[in-house]
Image (cartoon, rainbow, N blue to C red):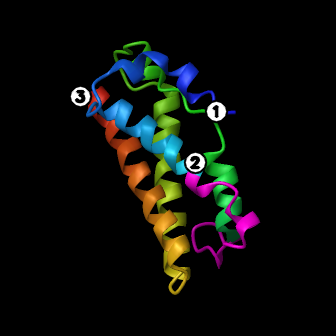
Amino acid sequence: MMQVFKINKPIFDFPPDHPARRFLEAFVECRKTCVGRETEGIDQEWLSEVDGRRHRFSSFAYEWLSFDVELDGWLHDAPQVTESEKRALEAIETMRRLMAECKAAADGNPRIVNMCNQILDTLDLWSECIHRRAE
């Protein structure tokens, strides 16, 4: 079960348009939508130029989305970008590149394209969330 709500409880009290809350809500929805799709016969495979490996959408979702994110910078009102935020920004760039490749490979697989778009939108919100806090 997702612990995102418990870990980030104070953030869910922020206004609905707050960047941290928008990201968390999108992340939870993205995880619900995108993880476990291979069991429904929906998947996409591609050979990545990012790392030279063969990937599957379902493997990407498990590897990159199946964790409980903690927005420590927002929770602790950190004066600078935290180490976890720095790592997240690096990971976001890798995820964006992988999803762009997956989306290109999924031409003709509209359900995967839609999930790629959802992931890319969620990544944009995550990046915005970190950058807005650091302003």
| Residue located at (49% from left, 79% from top) | 104
Residue 6: x percent and y percent?
Answer: 57, 20
Q: Nearer the viewer, residue 127 or 122?
A: 122
User: Residue 135: which disc?
Assistant: 3
121 vs 106, left or right, is: left
Are dots 2 and 1 in contact, CB under 8 Å?
Answer: yes
User: Residue 115: which disc?
Assistant: none
Work out which quarter of the rendered image holds the N terminus and state it.
Answer: top right
Q: Nearer the viewer, mark 3 or mark 2?
A: 2
Tell me the amino acid under the disc marked 1: Met
Who comes first in sequence, dot 1 or dot 3?
1
Q: Secondary structure at mark 1?
A: loop
How far apart are labels 2 and 1 at the CA level?
A: 9 Å
Tell me the amino acid under the disc marked 2: Arg
Residue 28: x percent and y percent?
Answer: 52, 41
| Residue located at (47% from left, 35% from top) | 86
Tell me the amino acid under the disc marked 3: Glu
How far apart are labels 1 and 3 at the CA level?
A: 29 Å
Q: Secondary structure at mark 2?
A: helix
Residue 85: x percent and y percent?
Answer: 46, 32
Q: Quadrant of residue 105?
A: bottom right
* Residue of label 2: 31
